[in-house]
Image: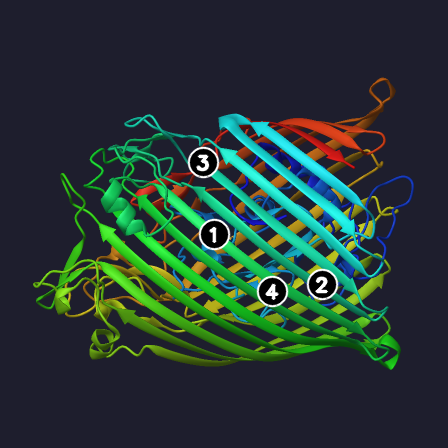
Amino acid sequence: MLMNIKLNTCVSRFAMAAIIATMGSGVAHAQATEDAGKAAVPADNGGNLGDIVVTAQRRPERVQEIPVAVTAFSEATIRNLNLNDAISVSKYVPSMISQHNAGLATANSYFLRGLGNTQSAATFDPPVGTYVDDIYVARQNANNYAFFDTERVEVLRGPQGTLFGRNTTGGAVSIIMRKPSDRYGAKFESTYGSYGRVTSKVSVDIPVSEKLLTKWSAFYIKDDGYLKNITTGEHLNGETSYGFRSDVRILATSELTVDLSGEYTKNTGTYFGVRTLPIASSRFRTSTTPVFYEAATNMRTTSCKGDPVNILLSTGNGLCLNSENYAASANVSWATDAGTLQGIFGYRKQDQGYINNYSSGTVNKYAGFILADRIKNDQFSGELKWSSELMDGRLKYVTGIYYLQENNALQTAQFSGGTTSYVLATTRANGVDYGVDVRFKQKVETAAVYLQADYELVDNLTATLGARYTYEKKNLDFFSSDRFLNPAWNHGAAGYTSDDVRAAGIPLSQTQKRVTPRVALSYKVNPNTIVFASATNGFKSGGWNGTNSVPFQVLPFRPEKTWSYEGGFKSDLFGRKLRLNGTVYLAKTTDLQVTSGIIVPPSTIVSQLARNAGTLRTYGFEWETMYAPTKRFSIFVNGSINRGKYLSTVLTPGVPDASQIQTSTIPLRVPKFQVAGGATYKVPVNALGGDVGFSGAYRHNSPYAVAALNTAFAPTEDFVDLNLTYDHADGKWGSSFGVSNLTKQETITANFISLFPGDPRRFTGRVWFNF
C-alpha cells in the first residue's frame, strides 16, 4: 500500500538491519521485478546472496552491473521484515540523513551528500526527488510514503539530472509498487506497540480473467503519540490515518500491457517540539536544553478539517494536521521487436491544512508563534519513453520526452504576541504596516527531452553518454487577504498583491533552460566484479521566498547546480557469499540554496530568507558489505565517511557574523562518519513447525548540524534494535516482537523556535497471515 503518512513502527528500524543485509548493492534475498521479465540470480547452496533488478537507468538491469551508486530494497525484504516507510529506509542509506520537516509529520526532509532542504512551500523545491512508479512527486509536504505491497525501493545517490531530471542535485528516492497477481490471494498484517500504536493492512489479489488482473489494498493506523503536554495532559506526535488503493493490470496482448492505479489517503496528527530549559546545552550545542519528551503549551489539539485560521479563531485550539491525497496513474508498455515504448501518465492532488504552535515551552497559547496554513497542490505529468538495443546488444539506449504541470496555492497566517486572544502578526516596513496573512498561487510548467546510451567499446568496457534538455517556466501571483481588515495596513487588508511585489522590482516569472549531461565508464573485471567512474550534472530549480510577510522580501533565487565525480566498484566474492561495494565521490554545488541572514532595504532588520548562499564542496567514501556463509545466517557492515565545506559564501554587509553562512560554517546534515552493522540468524524448530529468527542491529552517526547557522546539532547517535520472529513452515502466517531504539537514544531533528525530537524507544508485536 502506498500512503502519504508517517508510519514508524518499532520493528522497522530493526528490520532495516536485516534488510540491508538482504538487499542488492549490499543487500540479499532480492527478487527480480515482474516487469523486467527476469528471475533473480540464485545463490549457490552454501550462501544466500542474490540479485535485484532495478530501473535506476530507466530500464531493467542487475544492480550489481550498473555504474550508479544505488541502494535497492526488494519486495521480499519489505514483506518479510516489515519495512515501513521512506524515512525508515533512508536511515540506512550511506551519506543520507532524513527527518520530518519541523511541525509537519507528512513531509520528509532528505539530505544526500549534504544536499537537501527543510522547506515545504511550493516556491522552494527539494534537491532529492521522490518518484512513485516512475512518476515525479513535485511537493515535499506529503512525501513520507509508507510501504505495503511495494515491489522495491531504489535510493540513488548523487545528481540524476539526465534520466530523472530537475530537482535531483542530491539524488532520488524511487518507489515501485507491486503489480496485481494472476492468482487469487490475500495478505493481512496487524501490529500493536508502544504509545497505543495499532496498524492494520490488507491486500487482496482478484484476477478477473487471464487478461484482467486486479489488486485492492487498504490500511489503518492509530497512534496516541509519545510527546506529553504537561500543561493540558494530552499526548502529541501521534496520528490517525487510513487509505485505499486499487491496481488494475490489462494484458491486452503478449506485447501490450496497461497498468492503472488509483488511491486515496487521509492523515491527521501532530509533530510538535519539546519544551526547553534556559540552560545552554553542550551536547546539542544549543542555547537551551531540551526536555524529552515533554511540551508545555496550553493549546489543545483539534481537527484541521476546513480552514485552519477559522478553526483556530473559533475554537481557540490547534496543534493539528489534516492531509487528504488523491492519485491516479497509467502506464502503457508496448514491446516490439525493435524496442519498448512506454507511456507514463500521472495525476496527484493534495488538500492540506495545519495549525502548529512552534513555541512548545510557552504556556500561554496566545503568546506563542503559530502558523495556520492551507495548502492545495495538484499536478499532471506525461512521459513517452523508448528503450532499445542495437548492434547485437553492444549499444543500449533510452530516450524520451517529458511534461509536467503544477498548480499550487498557499494561505499562511502567523499569530504571535497575544495575551488573551490570538493576534495576527504584523510587520512594519518603509512606513507601511502589513498583516501576515500571505496568499499566493503558483503555476509551473516544465518540458524535457533526454537520451542516454551505453556502448560496449571493447569486450567488457562500456561507455555511457547522456544528456537532458529542460525548459521550465514558473509564474507566481499574490493576493490580499479578505478575512483580516485594518485601515492602517497596506491596502486596508492583510497580505499584499502581485503589484506590490513588482513595485519592489521583483519579477514574478522565471524561465529556465538547462542541459544536464552524464558520462561514465565501466569495466567488468569478471562476471561478478565491475569498476566504474562517472561525471554527472544536475540542477535544482530557482524560486522565491514566497511566504514572507512583506513584498520586498519575496526575493527570487537562481537554480542550484551540481557536478558530481564518482568512482567505485561492485563485487560478489567467494562463491557469492561476500558482497563488497564501494564508491568515492566529489561533488561541487554552485548557487547553493539555503536559508540564511540578510538585510533587505529599506528594512534594517535581519531576516532569515532562502537565497543562493555560495559554493559547497562535499566528498567521501561509501560502502555496502554483506557476508552470508549460509542461507540462515548473514551479517552486514555499511556506512560512509563524508566531509563538507563552503568554498565561498555571499555575505551581506551589516548582518552580524552569527546570522550569516560563512566559509567556516559547518554544512547541514553531513556527519563525518556513519556506520550500520547487524546480524540475522534463523533456525528451524520442528516442535514449533517453523523457523525462529533473531536479529540485532547497531547504527551510528557522528554529530551533525541541524540548523543552517550551526545553532543546533544532533549529538553522537547510537541506535540499537532487536527483533525476534517466527515464520510457520507453510508460509501462511508468522509473528514477531521487537524493540527499536533500545538504549533510548535522544536526538533532535530540527530547530525552528522549538527543538524537534527523534523517536523514543518503542516495543512492537506483529502478526501476519497469507491466504
Q: Residues within 10 Å of mark 2 (few under 14, many from 20)?
A: some
**Is residue 703 placed above or below 229 in the rendered structure?**
below
Residue 307 lies, in percent from the top left, at: 32, 52
Residue type highlighted by circle 2: Asp
Mark closer to the observer (4, 1): 1
Mark closer to the observer (3, 1): 1
The residue at which mark 1 appears reads as 324
Q: Which is nearer the eye, 310 or 63?
A: 310
Q: In the rendered view of the protein, which quadrant contains the C terminus? A: top right
Would you say the residues marked 4 and 1 are in contact, meaning their CB atoms lie under 8 Å apart? no
Q: Secondary structure at mark 3?
A: loop
Dot placed on the residue nearer the N-terminal end, 3 or 1: 3
Q: Which is nearer the eye, 757 or 181?
A: 181
Can see residue 691? Answer: yes
Residue type highlighted by circle 4: Ile
Can see residue 545? Answer: no
The residue at which mark 4 appears reads as 135
Residue type highlighted by circle 1: Glu
The residue at which mark 2 appears reads as 259
Q: CA distance from mark 4 to mark 1?
A: 19 Å
- Left or right for 757, reference 585: left
- Left or right for 548, reference 63: left
Dot placed on the residue nearer the N-terminal end, 2 or 4: 4
Q: Secondary structure at mark 4?
A: strand
The residue at which mark 3 appears reads as 238
Q: CA distance from mark 4 to mark 3?
A: 29 Å
